Amino acid sequence: MLKPLLAVSLLALPFAAAPAQAPSAQWTVAGGEQGCAVHTPSGDGMVVSILAGPGQEALLFLIQNRAWSSLQDGGSYDIAVEFDDAGPWQLKAVAKTEIDQDGPGLMFAVPPGQKSGSDFITEFVQAAGMKIDGQGQRMGSLQIGSGRSAMTALAQCIGRVFARQPATEEPKGIGGAPAITI
């Protein structure tokens, strides 16, 4: 199930152009039996996490911000995600309000086994920045300068999950799971 996800993610990475120069985002990767996640915060309260797990056909992107207190849990939201100035991706996201200390967020699925998902991931790994708009307004933006490193670490973590090896050596991470910083 997730093996096509891993294969597509790995295949997309080597052929993507070098990412634009930008301040490097610091990504954390965590993993265990339930799956893997990469996570990076911005200086203005926005956080992006990408999650993958066994049996999932899509990567889950979770964008959080403590300032988004008006989100309705379980509500559906039309958002536009744009990497650098490549043009916006029109997406349907689901609001999650009780997640963690990073605040409420919007979650959407990206299926890398489909062309649109593969194209989204390719833009992500090439981009220096990410902007999120909703209801015609800018909801936030952040630097993702090492999106390629984040996706590579996520793919390696998924590979370790399939091989039933420990994901990392360090004792802290997302939700208390082991983590490393890349």
Image (spheres, rainbow, N blue to C red):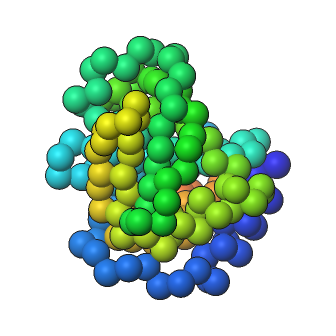
Side of 22 relative to 87 (left or right): left
Please tell me which residue lies in front, 56 or 168: 56
Q: For the C terminus, which image quadrant?
A: bottom left
* Image coordinates for residue 82, horizontal then vertical, percent: 45, 55
User: Eyeballing the image, is 9 above or below 174?
Assistant: below
Q: Between residues 112 and 139, which one lies in front from this camera angle?
A: 139
Q: Is residue 13 above or below residue 5?
A: below
Q: Quadrant of residue 68?
A: top left
Q: Evaluate whether residue 122 shows in this view.
A: yes
* Residue 5, picture quadrant: bottom right
Asked whether the viewer can see residue 33, the reply is no
Q: Residue at x 70, y 50 (%)?
A: 111
Q: Residue at x 45, y 23 (%)?
A: 96
Say whether residue 47 is left or right of residue 92.
left
Report the residue that reaches farthest toward the left.
Answer: 43
Q: 30 or 137: which is nearer to us?
A: 137
Count of marks overlaid on the render: 0
Instruction: Name the residue rendered at 70%, 56% in the picture.
Output: 116
Q: Position of residue 41 (x, y in %)?
A: 28, 50
Residue placed farthest to the front in the image? 136
> Which quarter of the picture shows residue 121?
bottom right
Of residues 40 and 78, the one nearer the viewer is 78
Residue 32 screen position, x and y as percent:
56, 47
In percent of width and height, residue 165 lies at 63, 59
What residue is rendered at 49% in x and 53% in y?
88
Q: Is residue 33 left or right of residue 85?
A: right
Classify 113 as above or below 21: above
